[in-house]
Image (cartoon, grey):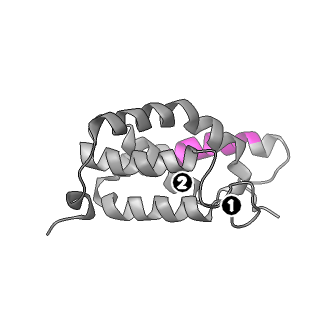
């Protein structure tokens, strides 16, 4: 049975550009919005899967597209909007993960959990609670 990734043609040059863009901007955007993103673990697992050299090209292409959308400063709903700002990013990421879910390995999820603990430890030290806080 074909998956959603079998129905799309991928441009290797575009995927390469998206990967460079994501690698250059992902961590800065993530850190700037830790307290506002409710889907951090999924975001990190997708990042680790997309940057894993063992990930198939089609899977990498799908995830890099979703990660590039997250990193873009301008998208359908501006990220600075309280409550709704990351709704579109979450929907794009959820769709991408659903399309390639069998390629997200336990190792990707473990790395995501470890990175999330490391990143949110700074929030705890700054007096912001036990991790990412809801906006509002």
* Left or right: where 74 falls relative to 114: right
Q: Which mark is residue 85?
A: 1
Quadrant assignment for the C terminus? bottom right
Q: Which residues are magenta?
A: 112-122
Front-most of residues 124 and 104: 104
What SS does tag 2 mark?
Answer: helix
Residue that appears at 50% across and 56% down: 42
The reply to whether callout 2 and callout 1 are in contact (CB within 8 Å) is no
Q: Main secondary structure of the magenta part?
A: helix
Front-most of residues 113 and 50: 50
Look at mark 2 in the image and give the residue it sits on.
Answer: 41
Residue that sits furthest to the right in the current view: 127
Q: Is residue 116 magenta?
A: yes
Residue that appears at 62% across and 45% down: 117
Where's residue 134, x and y in %? 75, 62
Looking at the picture, does residue 42 appear above or below residue 116? below
The total number of labels drawn is: 2
Give the quadrant of residue 41.
bottom right
Mark 1 residue crowding within 10 angstroms, few (<14) / some (14–19) / many (20+) = some
Where's residue 104, x and y in %? 35, 53
Where's residue 127, x and y in %? 85, 46
Quadrant assignment for the N terminus? bottom left
């Amino acid at each position: 049975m074909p998956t959603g990734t079998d129905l799309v043609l991928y441009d290797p040059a575009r995927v390469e550009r998206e990967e460079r863009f994501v690698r250059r901007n992902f961590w800065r955007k993530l850190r700037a919005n830790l307290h506002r993103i409710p889907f951090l673990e999924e975001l990190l697992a997708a990042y680790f899967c997309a940057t894993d050299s063992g990930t198939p090209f089609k899977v990498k292409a799908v995830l890099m597209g979703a990660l590039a959308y997250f990193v873009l400063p301008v998208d359908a709903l501006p990220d600075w909007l309280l409550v709704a700002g990351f709704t579109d990013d979450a929907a794009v990421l959820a769709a991408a993960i659903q399309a390639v879910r069998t390629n997200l390995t336990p190792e990707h999820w473990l790395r995501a959990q470890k990175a999330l603990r490391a990143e949110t430890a700074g929030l705890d030290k700054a007096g912001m609670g036990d991790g990412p806080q809801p906006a509002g």
